[in-house]
Image (spheres, rainbow, N blue to C red):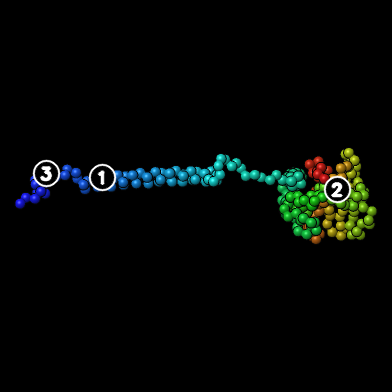
């Protein structure tokens, strides 16, 4: 007996073989996925490379990659008026002494000046609040001497009395002192001292101007302990006066 299912199958016949290559479809689909992933990874890699190049350029130019725009040079604090004046005086004193003593070498001063701020560099002024102080050892072919220069309102006997000291001179020293009138009421005390028993000598010229500011120059042929180093003082008395009265060393700071 033929079942209904057998009749139905006979009417439909045998289905034709499929023309779709399933394996090829799967391979093609996988290839699309791989290509899409490769494209995505390539884009990310290109972006990473571009960002890296930007950072390298910024760092090479000294820029901050986290800062937008050109930051410009770093801000600098301008020097105070007294610091600027100390620098100016240093340049002027160096120029004047180099011209007066060609070939001389200026060395750092000896410690032990007794001032609140001791100068440690040759001819470089330090700020003592009411005046500026510079010092140096001067070495030439004949030996070494010393120089000290103050500019400002330092209290000295001459500046308070406007006259030479009336105290008795030390018995072992020859002391010559005079006060010379200057321009616009300025006065200059000129001192020339020398030892009676050795070659030790020093010159000092102090000028006080009408505004109360002044300059004092002391130069000697000895170290601080008065050990004689060279014969004679490296500047004459008149050269010492000229240095003290140089307008370049005058200050108007209070």
Q: Residue at x 29, y 44 (%)?
A: 32
Q: Residue furthest left?
A: 1
What is the C-alpha distance between the residues marked 3 and 1? 34 Å
Query: Where residue 228 sits: x, y (%)?
Result: 80, 58
Query: Where residue 240 sits: x, y (%)?
Result: 82, 47
Query: Where residue 37 sits: x, y (%)?
Result: 34, 46
Q: Which residue is mark 1?
A: 28
Tell which tag, 2 or 1, sits nearer the viewer: 1
What is the C-alpha distance between the residues marked 2 and 1? 104 Å
Q: Give the mark, 3 or 1, whose residue is nearer the N terminus.
A: 3
Where is the C terminus found, in terms of image quarters? top right
Q: Residue at x 91, y 59 (%)?
A: 171
Q: Which residue is mark 3?
A: 12
Q: Residue at x 76, y 50 (%)?
A: 125
Q: Tell me if label 3 and label 1 are in contact, CB under 8 Å.
A: no
Disc 3 is placed on an element classified as helix
Disc 1 is placed on an element classified as helix
The residue nearer to you, when weighing 48 against 76, is: 48
Q: Tell me if label 2 and label 3 are in contact, CB under 8 Å.
A: no
Disc 2 is placed on an element classified as strand
What is the C-alpha distance between the residues marked 2 and 3? 135 Å
Q: Which residue is mark 2?
A: 206
Q: Residue at x 37, y 45 (%)?
A: 40
Q: Is residue 182 left or right of residue 40?
A: right
Visible in this render: residue 172?
A: yes
């Amino acid at each position: 007996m033929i079942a209904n299912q057998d009749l139905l199958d006979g009417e439909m016949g045998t289905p034709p073989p499929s023309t779709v290559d399933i394996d090829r479809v799967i391979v093609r689909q996988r290839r699309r996925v791989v290509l899409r992933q490769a494209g995505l990874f390539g884009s990310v890699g290109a972006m990473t490379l571009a960002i890296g190049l930007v950072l390298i350029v910024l760092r090479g130019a000294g820029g901050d990659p986290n800062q937008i725009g050109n930051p410009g040079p770093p801000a600098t604090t301008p020097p105070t008026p007294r610091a600027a004046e100390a620098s100016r005086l240093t340049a002027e004193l160096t120029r004047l002494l180099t011209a007066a003593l060609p070939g001389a070498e200026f060395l750092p001063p000896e410690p032990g000046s007794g001032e609140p701020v001791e100068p440690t560099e040759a001819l470089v002024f330090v700020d003592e609040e009411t005046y500026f102080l510079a010092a140096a050892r001067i070495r030439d072919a004949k030996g070494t001497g010393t120089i000290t220069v103050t500019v400002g309102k330092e209290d000295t006997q001459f500046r308070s009395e406007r006259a030479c000291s009336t105290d008795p001179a030390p018995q072992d020293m020859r002391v010559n002192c005079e006060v010379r009138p200057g321009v616009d009421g300025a006065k200059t005390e000129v001192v020339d001292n020398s030892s009676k028993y050795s070659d030790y000598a020093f010159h000092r010229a102090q000028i006080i101007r009408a505004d109360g500011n002044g300059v004092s120059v002391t130069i000697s042929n000895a170290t601080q302990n008065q050990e004689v180093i060279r014969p004679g003082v490296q500047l004459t008395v008149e050269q010492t006066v000229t240095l003290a009265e140089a307008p370049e060393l005058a200050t108007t700071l209070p």
